[in-house]
Image (cartoon, rainbow, N blue to C red):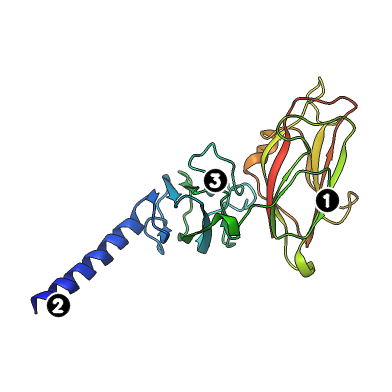
Amino acid sequence: MFAITSTILFANLLILQQTFAQEQCGGTLTAKEGVFQTPHYPHEYDSNTHCEWLIEVGADQVVQLTFAEFDLDDNYERDNCPTDRVLVYDGDSSSSPALTGRLCGQETPPVMTSTGRHMKISFKAGEDSFGGNGFKATYKSLPAEDHQRCILNSCGADITDTSCMIQSPGYPSGYAANLNCTWTIRAPQGVGNVVFTFTEADFKRKVDGRCSLNNVTLYDGSNIKAPVLHEPSCHTEDNRLKTTVIRSTGPVLIINMRTSAASDIKHGFNGNFVI
């Protein structure tokens, strides 16, 4: 009788501990798999809230993150997320490369996988937030050798992968002169949208500050005559480039990079896409 009672009490204690951990605003998660969520989920989160979770798995493992539910105030600007947002980093700090731009609204983000054993998730609700139910996310560790990150650094490509990192040739050591590189990203079977985010853009500007000679431009279609999704940019800070989610309206997105007649030691660009 005592043994049964002790077992029940221990089980109830574990449930209470798990509930408390899920209610916490951030923390370090070291289990092989787990669940975390915004405070008060599935009820509305408070305004002026900032939570950060660090996921750390074993050596030779990577982190796969899945958002089961997602509802953040977007203030009618889903691509900019001016009040509330989630950011996911491929590493253990906010200075690590971003796996995505700012996330908000009600659209469930894609599954994301780190390149190493750490992943950081940052949630922020502004003072002017109208609130939302927040999010519930699950994560698990996976063998690194089974999830090698796709990295493309040639001068253009026709891409049918569902996720990849794209880098300008020579990144981050500099870029050559007279480049005209075009990457065409196509969703498999012609179904879905392409979501692209910049980790860095660093090109030499003209004296007047314009980006007309060295730049990267995104097009919403299968060629450079398609509508421009994002105007020519030459630095990560241009028009909040680093935190903007650039989403095609159809199954094809074009990235075009051009450089002038002079090479440069500027980095070029680096970014990620998912379908």
Q: Is mark 3 on a helix, strand or loop?
A: strand
Packing grade of label 2 (10 A; few <14, some 14-19, many >=20) is few
Specify the farthest residue to the left: 2
User: Where is 31 relative to 87, above or below?
Assistant: below
The image quarter in which residue 97 lies: top right
Decide which of 75, 89 is in the foreground and name it. 89
Q: Is mark 1 on a helix, strand or loop?
A: strand
Q: Is mark 2 on a helix, strand or loop?
A: helix
Where residue 6 appears, x then y in whole percent?
Answer: 14, 71
Checking the image for residue 4, the label placed there is: 2
Viewport quadrant of the N terminus:
bottom left
Checking the image for residue 107, the label placed there is: none
The image quarter in which residue 192 lies: bottom right
Q: Earlier in the sequence, mark 3 or mark 1?
A: 3
Whether residue 96 is visible here, answered yes or no, is yes
Residue 227 relative to residue 151: left or right: right
Residue named by callout 3: 89
User: Where is 52 relative to 10, above or below?
Assistant: above
User: Where is 85 relative to 140, above or below?
Assistant: above
Where residue 218 appears, x then y in whole percent?
Answer: 79, 46
Specify the amino acid type for callout 3: Tyr
Residue named by callout 1: 157
Specify the farthest residue to the bottom: 1
Identity of the residue drawn at 72% across and 61% down: 193
Identity of the residue drawn at 51% across and 51% down: 60
Whether residue 26 is visible here, answered yes or no, is no
